[in-house]
Image (cartoon, grey):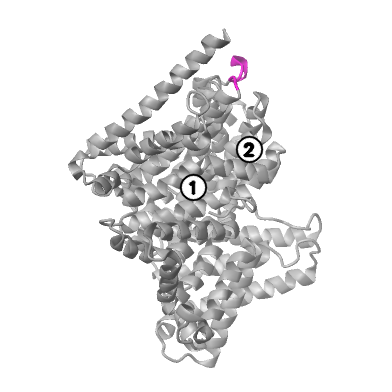
Amino acid sequence: MPDTESIPRPGIRKGWLALYRNRLITVMLIAWALFQLSLPQFLIIDTIKVRCIHLAFALPLGFLAFPFLKKKYSWRIFIADFILAAIGAAILIYTMIHWVELEGLAVLSTFDCLAGTVLVILLLEASRRVLGPALSILAIIFSVYVFFAEYAPGVFAMNNVSLNKYLSKIVFSSEGIFGIPIDVSANTVFLFVLFGGMMNKIGAGTFFNDLAISLLGRLKGGPAKAAVVSSGFTGLVSGSSIANVVTTGTFTIPLMKKVGYPPETAAATEVAASTNGQLMPPIMGAAAFIIAEYVGIPYIDVVKAALIPAVVSYIALFYIAHLEADKLKMKGLPPEEVPKFFKVLKHGFYFLIPLAVLVFELLYLRHSPKLAAYRGIIALAVVFFIRELIVAKRQKRSMFKTLGKSVAATANGVRQGAGNMIPVAVATATAGIIVGVVTLGVGDTIASAVEVLSCGNFFLLLVITAIASLILGMGLPTTATYIVMATITVGIITQFGAGAGIAVVPVIAAHLFCFYFGILADDTPPVGLAAYTAAAIAKSNPIKTGIKGFMYDLRTAVIPFMFILNPAMLLVGVKSVWMGLAVFAGATFGALAFTNAVQGRCVVRNRWYEIPFFLFASWLLFAPNSFGDLTGIPGNYYCIIMLGGLLVYAAVFYYQKFRSLDSKIVTA
């Protein structure tokens, strides 16, 4: 999910221009939030109208909150941005009003062609301002390609597309700008982002951080382990790697440095933990909701599928923190610097109430995600007001003043959450341009090209997809990277998988594969934004931080390959609790064994001949079915193969244990 901690005010410090611009932005953000909050229970309007209104807020805000010139801002620039914002909003309102006549129209009028062209241009410019140039450039390349496709070489050639057909598909249909991504943004993601923004605004991030430190601070490498846990908790409501770094890293990175962690190690640990926050249900950087729409399954099934890989990834990172602490001979925090668990819980337990409401609504009542998020927000607001009134009574402050301050704080939280949605809405709408172009026939062309590049090898195809996701993710928000890669490659992965001897590659597995590697781009040098953010806090080298963070994230990078080989990790085909627990245990120990291999140590530093045994054990534990298919062992020996992997892992572990004891005896 894109990261905006606040709506920027570049180059504006004082004066009437700053005042009125910021007031206008605030009014629009709060109006946007009120509109979205009215949808779950009060407003019943057509879904296309919801998408149009959603973008009619986001597009103008993109121009007003992110000016063309950030250093020299004048009233002329403000007027120009205001005019562009007004034109964009007017076109979207026109589209909403005349949608029935425009959708599927064979021949568009001159005015409609002009309006559609202007909307595409304005959206590309808003995307450039809000997200940087990468997504806009990619959309332009795809768009230009379809107009001149017949001149492309070899497998890339296809029939040209007319402007009329392009606009009919991209603007005036539900397969382009107003497709599934913007629908999910408007109907679901907004409320979850608003919930997360409000939670962080009233101090939930600090509470989760203190809670983790109170539990783990005294352990060896305690601050690093606390960073992993607190980032996991924050990821439940954030879905943003940079927001996680800023929220938890501000506290954990200085603590890690204090107990002796080198700056790069401290920053890299926080980066890896925060990046993986997007893997944690329920929000998952907005991807969970989009995956549910694309795959056509209930949202709760996406959460179930994503749960084991996410938890396993965090367990492995916790283990990495332990290995690093062991290698560096770290100690925990002094007892006097560790907050008391029950004291922290006493002063912040109310943060858990809105989360409990959200989980209860989703899992027990099985309400729609947007209704669950709406009620979670209501619960959060009620809890916040009650807390403020109790504090005011204890401190003998005026109740009316406290109530006024609480309303202002709530409005500020709403503004913050709505502001965080500008990049999401703009990204999903712009990605819709690429999705629409792919449906014009580019998808088949890309499939043919990928088949040529991969030489028909399925695993090479997966590697190409992973690398492409990492490269795209360097310049795109996670959500946009996922949408683009899923649109292009999911069909190819499922089709090639069947031809590669893999019985079935579930569609959900292919979608999550693209999503995982889009996330990992946040700490991939040279552009990893999360690494730059953490490096600024730790005062470390950002490139070294990114490299180290990516090395930590190798244990995450292997997981998508494993759940393609073993869909049981996504609970696909798992019909009993015991089988689910066996899969979870195997994946956990498989991740630990792989971590030992890539981090170069277990009990002591690895010797070269031990690494293949760790990797072999990891394979048996992660994907026993693939080993069985290769060796001809029947599928009902699944657990026996996992047990064999566990024995191999245990053998290497105890061998290193004996080596460790021998070295201590020799030293003595």
Q: Quadrant of the C terminus?
A: top right
Asked if one can make out residue 60 in the rendered structure from this viewpoint, the answer is: no
The mark tally for this picture is 2
Q: Is residue 173 left or right of residue 663?
A: left
Q: Measured along the vertical axis of the image, is residue 662 above or below residue 102?
A: above
Q: Classify residue 198 by image quadrant.
A: top right
**Residue at image point 67% right, 25% down:** 258
Confirm whether the magenta stretch covers residue 145.
no
In the image shown, does 123 or 291 lie closer to the viewer?
A: 291
The reply to whether callout 2 and callout 1 are in contact (CB within 8 Å) is no
Q: Residues within 10 Å of mark 1 (few under 14, many from 20)?
A: many
The residue at the far top in this view is 668
- The amino acid type, in three-letter code, at marker 1 is Gln
In the image shown, does 438 or 605 lie closer to the viewer?
A: 605
Asked if one can make out residue 100 in the rendered structure from this viewpoint, the answer is: yes
- Residue 434: image location, x then y, percent: 50, 71
Find residue 267 and name its label.
Answer: 2
Residue linked to disc 1: 278
- Residue 457: image location, x then y, percent: 38, 61
Q: Measured along the vertical axis of the image, is residue 3 above or below residue 537?
A: below
Query: Distance of mark 2 from mark 1, alpha carbons?
Result: 18 Å
Q: Which residues are magenta?
A: 329-337
Q: Secondary structure at mark 1?
A: helix
Find residue 20 and name its label.
Answer: none
